[in-house]
């Protein structure tokens, strides 16, 4: 089940579970900096997560992660699809060029219709929602 909450609505247990998941995938957790949280709940376990920063003109997607044992099972796709279908605002995310899975992530977002801009350290991936009817 996909759950969407504002950061202030998370209880202590949810914060702990999400932080644990983020730190299993990233060096740092930026949980406390997000406006909204979307997570995938399976049998009281949080197995997928996305942090969102909301702006008037776009939503910045951050720290998409899925618990290791649940990867390649469509969890990340379901989380992104939820955001894409429930947002009327442009979506932006960044893919670090110095990771071992950069090419896989880059191609994953391209297949979903995201456009890419490149600089020396990352790809800025964006999905334009303004022209979708």
Image: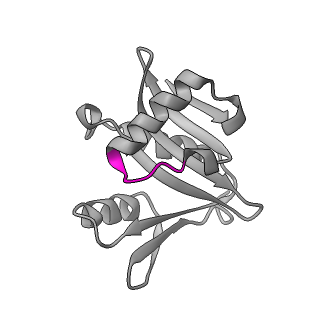
Residue lying furthest top in this view? Answer: 43
- Residue 58: image location, x then y, percent: 68, 62
- Residue 111: image location, x then y, percent: 36, 60
Is 40 placed above or below 59 here? Answer: above
Residue 26 shown in magenta = yes
Which residue is at a point 66% across and 49% down the rendered structure image?
Answer: 87
Which residue is at a point 53% across and 67% down the rendered structure image?
Answer: 126
Magenta span dominant secondary structure: loop
Which residue is at a point 43% across and 52% down the rendered structure image?
Answer: 28
Which of the pair 5/80 is nearer the observer? 5
Magenta span: 25-30
Residue 15 shown in magenta = no
Is 103 placed above or below 83 here? Answer: below
- Residue 114: image location, x then y, percent: 47, 65
Q: Viewed as shown, does residue 88 lie left or right of 100? A: right
Which residue is at a point 62% across and 24% down the rendered structure image?
Answer: 11
Task: State which quadrant residue 66 falls in.
Answer: top left
């Amino acid at each position: 089940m996909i759950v969407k909450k504002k950061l202030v609505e998370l209880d202590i247990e949810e914060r702990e579970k999400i932080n644990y998941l983020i730190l299993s995938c990233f060096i740092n957790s930026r949980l406390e900096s997000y406006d909204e949280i979307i997570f995938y709940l399976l049998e009281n376990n949080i197995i997928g997560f996305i942090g969102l920063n909301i702006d008037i003109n776009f939503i910045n997607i951050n720290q998409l992660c899925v618990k290791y044992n649940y990867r390649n099972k469509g969890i990340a796709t379901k989380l992104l699809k939820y955001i894409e279908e429930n947002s009327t605002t442009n979506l932006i995310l960044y893919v670090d060029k110095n990771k071992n899975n950069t090419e896989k992530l880059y191609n994953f977002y391209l297949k979903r219709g995201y456009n890419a801009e490149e600089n020396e350290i990352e790809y800025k991936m964006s999905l334009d929602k303004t022209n979708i009817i």
